[in-house]
């Protein structure tokens, strides 16, 4: 039986969270597509236009969170806090046919659906080729660290400049009697205090000036508190702190499952001069990961930054994929762009800001 898509308000997500998790589990069980993470995104950042699509058929389970754009162009619901496109397809066979059925099921007369931010290692669309009704658009390059073997050989393989700089900074700290240590918070009852500390770090930095800083009292802060309390209660969350003489000077907010540590957010105290606090924090985190042997990969999800390349050469491309209702749609939209210069409704999907 061919799966039929039904469209609901996003508020229905909680009632169907178990089905979302079943589809995610069948597709690889990615922690950033877990219903607890996705549900918090819906509650905190979803709007009246956000829709939940559900494939009604056991042979091709699938769910997606979507929003309409102008000109009947739809895309996945994609707040900046979500590193991956919010769609789970439990069966990867015939994914294009399944997506075409979804496009036809959308309200009105949808012309296309853009599935944003697809990780080639965690996407049902991997292997789908561009064609008359399918287009790929580059999104970002992102990095990961493979955790394999002892830390020391890995560390010796880093650049001489990185090793020299961090060794020198640690030596200076030791000479003046300063104490640098790593603390890991996994207790859900202490997440609120940790988010307050994290908000202090971002609130005193450049993000505060742009109005994008996490605080304990804004929606971003409430989102990360909710997610981390939930995941920590299941031993799947971790908040790493770098302490300088007992004071938090750098922090990572992370989710962990199935051997993957996903770094959601990083912040450090920009008022501390002469120390590469983010690098010192990650040296401690990575050394612990190698020593414990529990993790297999650390994901940096977000745009590739220069500091990522200090730690790893593992880089891959993430892309958006757009599925059109008709073969003439992409040609018509390209014509519309030429006739209407500048940003507009017929442009490719907008690139959300990375959450990290």
Image (spheres, helix red, strand yellow):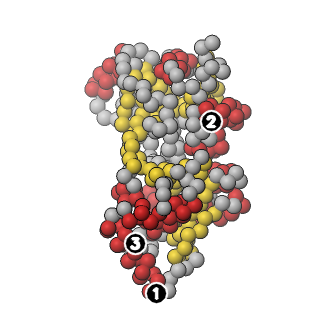
Per the image, label 3 sits on a secondary structure element best described as: helix
Percent of width and height locating residue 350: 41, 37
In the picture provided, is 133 more to the left or to the right than 237? Answer: left
Q: Residues within 10 Å of mark 2 (few under 14, many from 20)?
A: some
Foreground of the two, 69 or 186: 186
Q: Is residue 118 above or below residue 237?
A: above
For label 2, the residue is: 25
Q: Residue furthest top?
A: 1
Q: Residues within 10 Å of mark 1 (few under 14, many from 20)?
A: few
Per the model, the C-alpha gap separating discs 3 and 1 is 16 Å
Asked if the residue under mark 3 is in contact with the one under mark 2, i.e. CB atoms within 8 Å, the reply is no
Give whichever of discs 2 and 1 has the lower sequence position: 2
Q: Residue at x 38, y 41 (%)?
A: 317
Q: Nearer the viewer, mark 3 or mark 1?
A: 3
Q: Residues within 10 Å of mark 3 (few under 14, many from 20)?
A: some
Labelled disc at residue 137: none
Per the model, the C-alpha gap separating discs 2 and 1 is 51 Å
Labelled disc at residue 176: 1
Number of marks: 3
Q: Residue at x 42, y 61 (%)?
A: 154
Q: Is residue 193 above or below residue 115?
A: below
Foreground of the two, 120 or 67: 120
Q: Is residue 17 above or below residue 32?
A: above
Q: Quadrant of residue 305?
A: bottom left
Per the image, label 1 sits on a secondary structure element best described as: loop
Per the model, the C-alpha gap separating discs 2 and 3 is 40 Å
For label 3, the residue is: 166
Per the image, label 2 sits on a secondary structure element best described as: helix
Q: Quadrant of residue 338?
A: top left
Residue 136 shows in this picture = yes
Give whichever of discs 2 and 3 has the lower sequence position: 2
Give whichever of discs 3 and 1 has the lower sequence position: 3
């Amino acid at each position: 039986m061919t799966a039929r898509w039904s469209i609901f308000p996003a508020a229905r997500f909680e009632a169907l969270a178990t089905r979302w998790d079943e589809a995610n589990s069948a597709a690889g069980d990615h922690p950033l597509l877990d219903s607890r993470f996705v549900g918090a995104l819906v509650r905190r950042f979803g709007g009246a236009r956000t829709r939940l699509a559900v494939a009604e058929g056991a042979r091709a389970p699938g769910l997606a969170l979507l929003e309409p754009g102008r000109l009947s162009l739809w895309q996945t619901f994609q707040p900046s806090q979500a590193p991956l496109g919010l769609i789970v397809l439990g069966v990867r066979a015939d994914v294009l046919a399944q997506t075409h059925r979804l496009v036809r099921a959308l309200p009105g007369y949808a012309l296309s659906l853009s599935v944003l931010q697809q990780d080639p290692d965690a996407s049902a669309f991997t292997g789908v080729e561009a064609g008359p009704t399918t287009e790929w658009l580059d999104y970002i390059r992102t990095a990961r660290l493979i955790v394999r073997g002892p830390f020391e050989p890995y560390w010796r393989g880093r650049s001489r400049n990185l090793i020299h700089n961090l060794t020198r900074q640690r030596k200076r700290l030791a000479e003046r009697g300063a104490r640098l240590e790593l603390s890991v918070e996994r207790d859900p009852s202490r997440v609120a205090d940790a988010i307050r500390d994290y908000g202090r770090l971002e609130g005193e930095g450049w993000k505060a000036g742009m109005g994008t800083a996490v605080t304990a009292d804004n929606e971003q802060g409430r989102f990360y508190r909710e997610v981390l309390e939930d995941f920590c209660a299941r031993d799947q969350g971790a908040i790493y702190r770098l302490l300088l003489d007992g004071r938090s000077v750098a922090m990572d907010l992370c989710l962990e499952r199935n051997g993957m540590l996903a770094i959601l957010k990083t912040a450090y105290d920009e008022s501390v001069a002469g120390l590469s606090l983010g690098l010192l924090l990650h040296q401690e985190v990575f050394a612990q990961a190698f020593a414990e042997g529990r993790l297999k990969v650390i994901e940096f999800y977000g745009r590739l930054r220069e500091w990522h390349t200090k730690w790893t050469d593992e880089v891959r491309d993430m892309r958006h994929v757009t599925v059109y209702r008709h073969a003439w749609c992409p040609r018509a939209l390209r014509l519309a762009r030429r006739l209407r210069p500048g940003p507009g409704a017929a442009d490719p999907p907008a690139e959300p800001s990375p959450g990290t």
